Amino acid sequence: MLLGSVVLLVAMVAVRLSTRTGLPSLLLYLGIGVLIGQDGLGLDFDDAELTQVLGYAALVMILAEGGLGTSWREIRRAVPAAASLATVGVGVSVGIVATAAHYLIGLEWTTALIMGAVVSSTDAAAVFSVLRKVPLPQRLTGTLEAESGFNDAPVVILVVALSATEHEPKSWYVLVGMILLQLLIGLAAGLLVGRLGAFALRRVALPASGLYPIAVLALCVLAYAGGALAQGSGFLAVYVCAVVLGNARLPHRPAVRGFADGLAWLAQIGLFVLLGLLVTPHELVDDLVPAILVGLALTLVARPVSVVVSLLPFRQPWREQALLSWAGLRGAVPIVLATIPMVSQVQGSERIFNLVFVLVVLFTLAQGPTLPWLARRLRLGDPEAARDVDIESAPLERLRGHLLSVSIPERSRMHGVEITELRLPAGAAVTLVVREGSSFVPLPSTVLRRGDDLLVVATDEVRDATERRLIAVGRGGKLAGWLGGTGATATPR
């Protein structure tokens, strides 16, 4: 417990350091693990099977947090492109990387294919953390976030199948069929659990607000476990379930997001430290040059080609394709996947793990800090995009109503709108405004400002319409609805 608490506190300092220097925090967590490992403080850890189990659990938390924070409005149009990148793109990338690994560093074809599959998945944690600091257009952010949420599933299936080829060889069409079937089962499980869970949570008033985050995370884990037990993709199930729940406007939504964010940070820290413990640094020297060669093939050839091939039907501009190519960040996922052949005792699996570890460290160090610079050079930034207001709902079961807590962020077009211009539905009213630490009951002529917090009371019947109207005004200003703005037009009061 002492060691664990010290590691967590050091990791908190590492987050602050990474924010100031621009270094991806995952590298610092890996460094902590290496420091206390065999070549550092001497902690001996070599249990690949335990690492895989804990790694899967951590990935479930990371994917759940990513899904809860993903706006369906932003990714809806990007889903077809993201699905193509997560399937066709993965297949192209596996083939190119496997060919490079076979001819450049002399891996056997089976080992080379496993290597290609392991490094072909972008990492959800790395993508979510980096992209939310880069003001990209919604279609690009949506594509990258959806791809990182989707592509874990086919890659895990592929790595597991390839790692078992020595015992049970499978034809390529059998592998494709298995992947498609498991993806369909995982999608169905995620949608089912997410929608049933959202339906229940919106209609049941739990006795304590702290129970809502626990219930939401339990539903996400249920989706993963249920999908996996049904012989489907648990990773796709948990991400889809989290997206459904995150966009369902559940009670105490900011509290749910905060709880999930904290668990995701804990999962990332624990996972990367554990992976750092598993590696033996003095064994990495011989694999440095081979890892660089494979990484160059992946970053400069496989990823760009897979992006171009996958997006042919969508006709995206070359600048966007260039950014998508460079934004294929790797992180914990490839390293966790590299433990699968180790557990299956595939020949050469320890070398795969070492190659992947070095590749992830070097190329994350190169890609992560330079992504904002590349976005600016390609003129793809979108700093003026309006941000949605944050709405937290607390149900009042006996009074058949809801208290909506609304926060107006910096880039919200609700700034400058009068209370009466909100045009909330009959049955809803703004009852309190908190501004710069003081609260007051607003008049119909009160002008809202950035940074204000509002308390809105709404009956059960108009709760959803009230939320839609508030979001619409936040995006389109006082004329939202009259001039075709986003969101529903409410009945004027």
Image (cartoon, rainbow, N blue to C red):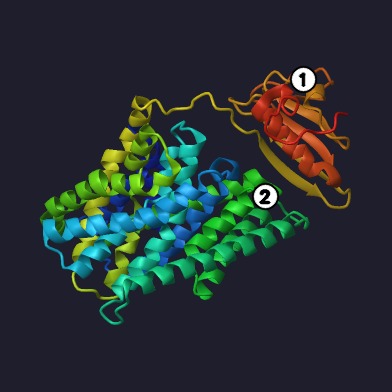
Residue located beneath label 1 in the image: 418
Q: Image quadrant of residue 274?
A: bottom left
Q: What residue type is labelled 2?
A: Ala
Q: Residue at x 69, y 39 (%)?
A: 391
Outermost residue toward the bottom in this view: 167
Quadrant placement of the N terminus: bottom left
Image-based side of 332 in relation to 249, left or right: left
Image-based side of 130 in relation to 423, left or right: left
Query: For numbered disc 1, what is the local secondary structure?
Result: loop
Question: Which mark, residue 436?
Answer: none
Quadrant placement of the C terminus: top right
Query: For numbered disc 2, what is the local secondary structure?
Result: loop
Q: Residue at x 33, y 71 (%)?
A: 172
In the rendered image, the vertical position of residue 112 relative to residue 466, given as above or below: below
Query: Residue 294: percent from the left, percent from the top?
Result: 19, 52
In the rendered image, the vertical position of residue 217 relative to residue 404, given as above or below: below
Proximity of marks 2 and 1: CB atoms separated by less than 8 Å: no
Q: Image quadrant of residue 96?
A: bottom left
**Which is more toward the observer, 271 or 413?**
413
**Which is more toward the observer, 91 or 159?**
91
Point out the tag, 2 or 1, that comes first from the N-terminus.
2
Q: Residue at x 58, y 43 (%)?
A: 71
Query: Residue 396: percent from the left, percent from the top?
Result: 82, 48
Would residue 309 be visible to someone looking at this image? yes
Could you classify mark 1 by the number of other residues whose Cα lies within 10 Å: few (under 14), some (14-19), or many (20 or more)? some
**Which is more toward the observer, 329 or 94?**
94
**Which is more toward the observer, 40 or 283?**
283
Q: Which amino acid does label 1 sit on?
A: Glu
Q: Which residue is drawn at 58% across and 62% down?
A: 190
Residue located beneath label 2 in the image: 248
Query: Residue 235: percent from the left, percent from the top?
Result: 48, 62
Query: Residue 46: percent from the left, percent from the top?
Result: 27, 68
